[in-house]
């Protein structure tokens, strides 16, 4: 306990509060259309490049570090006309619940359920394996390792039916092998600042052979294979905490230090084995939250002065010595890029590659009038901050959203108008010209299923001619007259 009594709580949302807030937002959408760590293990350094969740090749994507990639792995299929492959029904959750996380391997589509992780045949949707968990899932990494392992968060026990304290803490960190369908290990850690109470985590990520989780009580890291603790909070962290981490090709901490009302937010790339910071970049005074858009090169998003849309007023491009290269302004409502209010690694509709920042613009009136809204993908130079020539047009009635890099190209999803199916395109990273990879069916049933997955509350994964749409958050089952789905899959495979 700090001198003078306990420190006042920071202005943050707990997990349950964030779930309720997100649920309320979803309803609106539906209606409206230098740090010292304790190092307890140093076995094993970084292994293969961490792959994004949508990359079934386990890290072949040369554009994920923002440099010039060797070319993408996604090819134009013989027939770009897709069909509905399968649907997954909503689990029998009795209250608003988190279902964050989805991954694709060469054999499976993997999705958390209420208290389990399940691998489904990526074409048929049949269950390949199921990992039961002692409590509800409450977080997941958006990355997987080259050998198809990923990190999850879950509660240590079932929630009580009613009563005070029925919600369990999000304290368990675990690693799942997405190939074998096994929970390789799980554990919690304590902090000297909280006695015997397990640390509650808000989010988890993966970089190389390190799993890192952060949240209300600070951050901790673990060896991917063994679960050995690499670092956790110490007694010297009384006025500091790792809010969370960005993973992938590097590991970057968002750290807050200072007394209540006078915190300073810093961005710290850390050694994934020792946890030692490589440098500290101080965010502007008054910035309470920051998000990691990309870790290599390092791109940070923040809302300076509450002037941005969806939690972003500026993108900060920071070099490998901790110097600011440029700021790219996103004030007002020009862009559709979104970052979570408190989550460090939750940005969507923005990707980094080829020395560029690719952004979805906000929907605007198209040539067809107010019912023909559309948007574009535009790009900015990460060194100068200047807009670059070219744009990828969504087309009348479509909204185009960048999902990830594929070598030098951008994989993008085009959310459809009411009477058409969606599309997936590969956008040339320089010319911003689009090549069609997939066009979803336009029959009424397929359209109805596809349109259930709203921008800002759903996960979109595309890999090898297959598109998976899944929910991050769902209200109680059976409370709506419309059928709800945990996930829907489309494929160009016959």
Image (tube, helix red, strand yellow):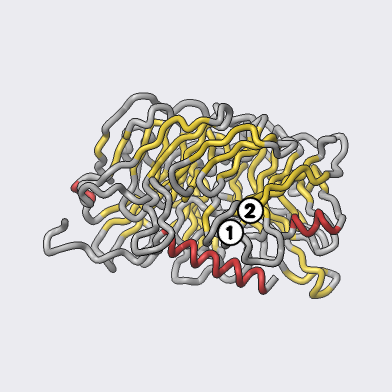
Q: Disc 1 vs disc 2: Cβ atoms closer than 8 Å?
A: yes
- Say few, some or many: other residues with alpha carbon within 10 Å of mark 2 (under 14 / 14 to 19 / 20 or more): some
Helix, strand or loop for disc 2: loop
Is 84 drawn above or below residue 443 in the view shown? Answer: above
Can residue 220 be seen in this snapshot? yes
Q: Kindly report which numbered mark, 1 or 2, lies closer to the viewer in this rendering.
A: 2
Q: Depth check: 238 or 135 in front?
A: 135
Q: Depth check: 253 or 112 in front?
A: 112
Helix, strand or loop for disc 1: strand
Q: Report the residue marked by disc 1.
A: 474
Which residue is rendered at x = 85% and y = 42% of the image? Answer: 80
Earlier sequence position, callout 1 versus callout 2? 2
> Which labelled disc corresponds to residue 224?
none
Which residue is rendered at x = 66% and y = 58% of the image? Answer: 360
Q: Report the residue marked by disc 2.
A: 90
- Residue 399 percent coordinates (x, y): 74, 60
Which residue is rendered at x = 87% and y = 34% of the image? Answer: 78
Q: Depth check: 5 or 243 in front?
A: 5
């Amino acid at each position: 306990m700090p001198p003078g009594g306990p420190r006042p709580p920071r202005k943050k949302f707990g997990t349950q509060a964030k779930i309720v807030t997100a649920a309320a937002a979803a309803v609106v959408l539906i209606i409206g259309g230098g740090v010292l760590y304790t190092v307890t293990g140093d076995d094993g350094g970084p292994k293969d490049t961490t792959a994004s969740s949508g990359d079934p090749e386990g890290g072949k994507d040369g554009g994920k570090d923002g440099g010039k990639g060797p070319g993408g792995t996604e090819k134009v299929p013989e027939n770009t006309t897709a069909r509905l492959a399968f649907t997954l029904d909503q689990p029998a959750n009795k209250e608003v619940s988190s279902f964050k996380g989805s991954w694709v391997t060469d054999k499976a589509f993997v999705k958390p359920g209420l208290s389990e992780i399940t691998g489904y045949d990526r074409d048929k949707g049949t269950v390949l394996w199921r990992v039961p968990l002692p409590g509800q899932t409450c977080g997941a990494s958006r990355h997987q390792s080259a050998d198809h392992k990923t990190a999850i968060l879950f509660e240590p026990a079932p929630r009580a039916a009613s009563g005070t304290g029925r919600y369990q803490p999000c304290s368990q960190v675990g690693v799942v092998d997405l190939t074998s369908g096994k929970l390789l290990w799980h554990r919690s850690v304590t902090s000297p600042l909280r006695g015997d109470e397990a640390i509650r985590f808000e989010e988890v990520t993966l970089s190389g052979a390190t799993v890192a989780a952060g949240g209300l009580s600070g951050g901790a890291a673990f060896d991917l294979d063994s679960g050995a603790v690499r670092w956790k909070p110490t007694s010297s962290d009384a006025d500091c905490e790792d809010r969370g981490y960005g993973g992938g090709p590097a590991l970057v901490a968002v750290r807050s230090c200072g007394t209540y009302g006078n915190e300073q937010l810093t961005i710290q790339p850390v050694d994934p084995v020792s946890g030692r910071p490589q440098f500290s970049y101080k965010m502007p005074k008054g910035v309470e939250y920051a998000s990691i858009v990309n870790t290599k090169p390092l791109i940070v998003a923040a809302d300076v002065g509450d002037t941005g849309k969806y939690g972003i007023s500026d993108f900060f491009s920071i070099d490998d010595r901790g110097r600011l290269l440029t700021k790219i302004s996103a004030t007002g409502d020009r862009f559709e890029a979104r970052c979570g209010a408190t989550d460090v690694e939750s940005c969507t509709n923005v990707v980094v590659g080829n020395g560029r920042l690719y952004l979805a613009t906000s929907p605007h009136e198209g040539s067809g009038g107010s019912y023909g809204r559309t948007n574009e993908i535009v790009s900015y130079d990460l060194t100068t901050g200047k807009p670059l020539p070219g744009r990828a047009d969504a087309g009348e009635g479509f909204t185009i959203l960048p999902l990830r890099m594929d070598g030098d190209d951008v994989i993008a999803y085009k959310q459809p108008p009411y009477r058409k199916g969606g599309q997936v395109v590969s956008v040339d990273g320089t010319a911003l010209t689009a090549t069609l990879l997939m066009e979803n069916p336009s029959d009424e049933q397929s359209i109805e299923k596809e349109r259930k997955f709203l921008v800002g509350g759903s996960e979109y994964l595309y890999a090898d001619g297959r598109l998976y749409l899944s929910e991050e958050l769902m209200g109680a089952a059976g409370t709506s007259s419309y059928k709800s789905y945990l996930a829907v899959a489309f494929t160009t495979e016959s």
